[in-house]
Image (cartoon, rainbow, N blue to C red):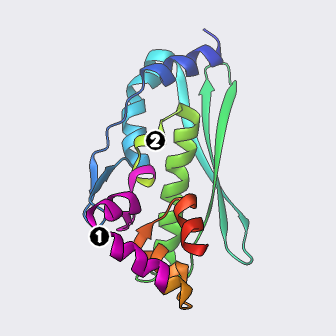
Amino acid sequence: MTINQKLATIQTKFKSKKSRFNSFGKYYFRSAEDILEAIKPYLLEIGVAVTINEELIATDPMPIIKTTAKLIDEKGLELEAVAIVGVDLNQKGMQTPQQFGSASSYAKKYALGNLLLIDDTQDSDATNNHGKKPVSKVISKQKLSDVQKAVDYIKAGGKIDAIKAKYDLTSEQEKLLQA
């Protein structure tokens, strides 16, 4: 089997459950550790190894971590996928080592996800609305007068960012409010 065939075999059979729960956002997600645990049975069976390397590639104005996930076969042939993540040093409630650790974990998860073709459409970052209510649901539950209040707020000089902070707006809805 070629290294491409080995990777394709893993990609089509691989499953990693979302075993972790974010109580703030109320969603399940998978971590890099979950992915690594799920891939271990394939390593000996298919004759490959997986490695992860990290590199600090920029520091100004924001530190940037480049993470490379590699699949290596017994012949030494390699396939790799990369994820690049910024480190938010202004993230409240975290010490600097925690900020780097959080960015590192995130980059590992996405480098592995890129290598193994993990579908992120059902991942926490794809489904998390970060506490915002979708506008379509809100409008259907509210009176038209409430929508008019939003339009009047914008016309009176209010900022659309205040509305966007509370609701997810489609581009059409945003254009409507700015018209």
Residue lying at 68% horizontally and 74% vertically, measured from the top left: 62
Residue 80 picture location, percent across and down: 66, 35
Whether residue 33 sits left or right of residue 140 in the image: it is right
The part of the chain drawn in magenta is 126-152
The residue labelled by disc 2 is 121
User: What number is the disc on residue 143?
Assistant: 1
Tell me the kind of residue under disc 1: Lys
Tell me if residue 99 comes above or below residue 76 in the rendering.
below
Q: Is residue 132 magenta?
A: yes
Residue 7 picture location, percent across and down: 57, 22
Q: Quadrant of the N terminus?
A: top right
Task: Report crowding for label 2: few under 14, some 14 to 19, many 20 or more residues within 10 A (C-alpha).
Answer: few
Q: Dot 1: what SS?
A: loop
Residue lying at 75% horizontally and 77% vertically, measured from the top left: 60
Whether residue 128 sits left or right of residue 57 in the image: it is left
State how many labels appear.
2
